[in-house]
Image: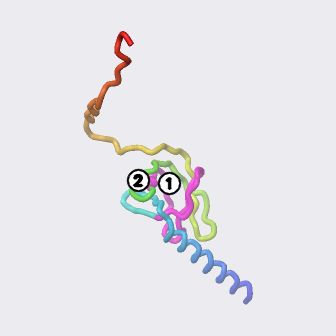
Amino acid sequence: MDGFLAERVASALDEARVAKSVKRSRYKVVVGNKTFPVTKLDDKGFSIAAMTAPTMRGYVDIYDGPHLIGRQLVVLASHAGGEAVYEYKLQSAECEAPADYVRKREKIAGVLTGPPKGL
């Protein structure tokens, strides 16, 4: 009976820890039209709450608030402590969405010249 109670307490503590980190998170993962808050993020991967985590495999976009951090190719690594941990298979830097048209070049604001002759 004590082992059962300890397991329930441990799982409740894990759920509370994950819920707290989800509320604090400013990072999010976007897959298609679904968004998931990130609980941990580092240079090797990220984790999200296991109860909401799909089995993502493929390209995902990671945002810091409204700003795109990059597009990564991910694979599910493990489920541990109420979190689903995903590892990067391929990383890309911050990027813009591809344009369907040719962008105009920005006009030159000014030209720097050298010192005048004779000085």
Region in magenta: 37-63
What secondary structure is marked by label 1? Answer: strand
Q: Label 1 amino acid?
A: Arg
Of residues 54 and 87, the one drawn nearer to the viewer in this rendering:
87
Q: Which amino acid does label 2 sit on?
A: His
For residue 57, above or below residue 80: above
Tell me the quarter of the image containing the C terminus. Answer: top left
> Residue at image x 39%, y 57%?
66
Residue extending furthest toward the front: 119
Query: Circle 2 — which element?
Result: strand
Q: Residue at x 35, y 11 (%)?
A: 117
Q: Is the magenta stretch mostly helix, strand or loop?
A: strand
Residue 53 drawn at (x, y percent): 50, 65
Q: Is residue 25 above or below residue 99?
A: below
Q: Where is residue 2 in the image (x, y as percent from the top left)?
A: 74, 88
Reply yes or no: does residue 18 show up in magenta. no
Residue ranking furthest to the right:
2
The image shows residue 3 at horizontal and vertical percentages of 73, 84
At a point 28% along the width and 33% down the height, the residue shown is 106
The answer to which image quadrant residue 94 occupies is top left
Numbered label attached to residue 67? 2
For the residue pair 57 and 41, the one nearer the viewer reads as 41
> In 3D space, how far apart are the residues under numbered discs 2 and 1 (Cα atoms)?
22 Å
Q: Which of marks 2 and 1 is nearer the N terminus?
A: 1
Q: Residue furthest bottom?
A: 1
Q: On the image, numbered disc 1 is attached to which residue?
A: 57
- Please provide percent x and percent y for residue 16: 57, 77
Q: How many labels does the image show?
A: 2
